[in-house]
Image (cartoon, grey):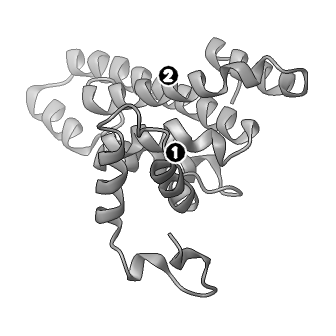
Amino acid sequence: LKIKKVKNFKYYHVVGREHILARLAAEGENEKNIKGPVASALTKLLSNSYLPIGTKGSEQIRRTLLFLSEAPKAARVFYSNITTHSDVTVVSKLVGLLLKTLKIAVDRHIEEKLNDSTMSDSESYSKNQESDALIASNTKLMSGIAQALQILLSSIGTLLEEAENENCLDFVQNSIKGTTI
């Protein structure tokens, strides 16, 4: 964690990403540690990788889905701590993007089911091979998204009630209704 502060030095050249994610996941094994100093510091260290500010929403979602797929336990700890290192606006935007992603997955699943009923078996198999992992039947990813949403909403819930965050509250509520993004 001290190495990150050295100018022009990349911490991942010293400690591999897998090791950092394993340590972050280990912090979540004990509920007392999930928001402890090590978990918080690792979250800060990884925040540019998994919640980059100033990037397009599609890139944030790509990184989030990759994180949830590759390291779900580390992602749980990361999202439990991210509000201490990011603005409510940033977290609210991620909530909106995740909600939109869930809707897209459900829509794809419905479309696939409708297409399956009109396609031959070989056409259906070929179509399934081409489809993304982003579909509602990918229960592992969908449960990861749902858990991330629950963690993020819980962490910003009281902040959304503050007057200065009224726009964020409106954004989250409209995202839940499906009228935003």
Q: Amino acid at mark 1?
A: Ile
Identify the residue at image location x=41%, y=76%. Answer: 12
Residue corresponding to mark 2: 150
Q: Please indicate whether residue 181 sits to the left or right of residue 119 in the image.
A: right
Q: Residues within 10 Å of mark 2 (few under 14, many from 20)?
A: some
Q: Earlier in the sequence, mark 1 or mark 2?
A: 1
Q: Position of residue 26 (x, y in %)?
A: 29, 47
Q: Are marks 1 and 2 in contact (CB under 8 Å)?
A: no
Quarter holding residue 164: top right
Q: Is residue 52 left or right of residue 16?
A: right
Disc 1/disc 2 C-alpha distance (Å): 16 Å
User: Foreground: 141 or 129?
Assistant: 141
Q: Which residue is mark 1?
A: 61
| Residue 123 in the image, given as x and y percentages of width and height | 16, 34
Under mark 2, the amino acid is Gln
Residue 135 in sight: no
Q: Looking at the image, which residue is at 23% across and 37% down?
A: 127
Q: Is residue 119 above or below residue 70?
A: above
Is residue 102 found left or right of 141 in the rendered image?
Answer: right
Task: Spot the residue most to the right.
Answer: 164
Compared with 33, 161 (above or below) is: above
Dot 2 falls on a residue whose secondary structure is helix
Q: Residues within 10 Å of mark 1 (few under 14, many from 20)?
A: some
Residue drawn at (65%, 43%), measured in percent from left and top? 84
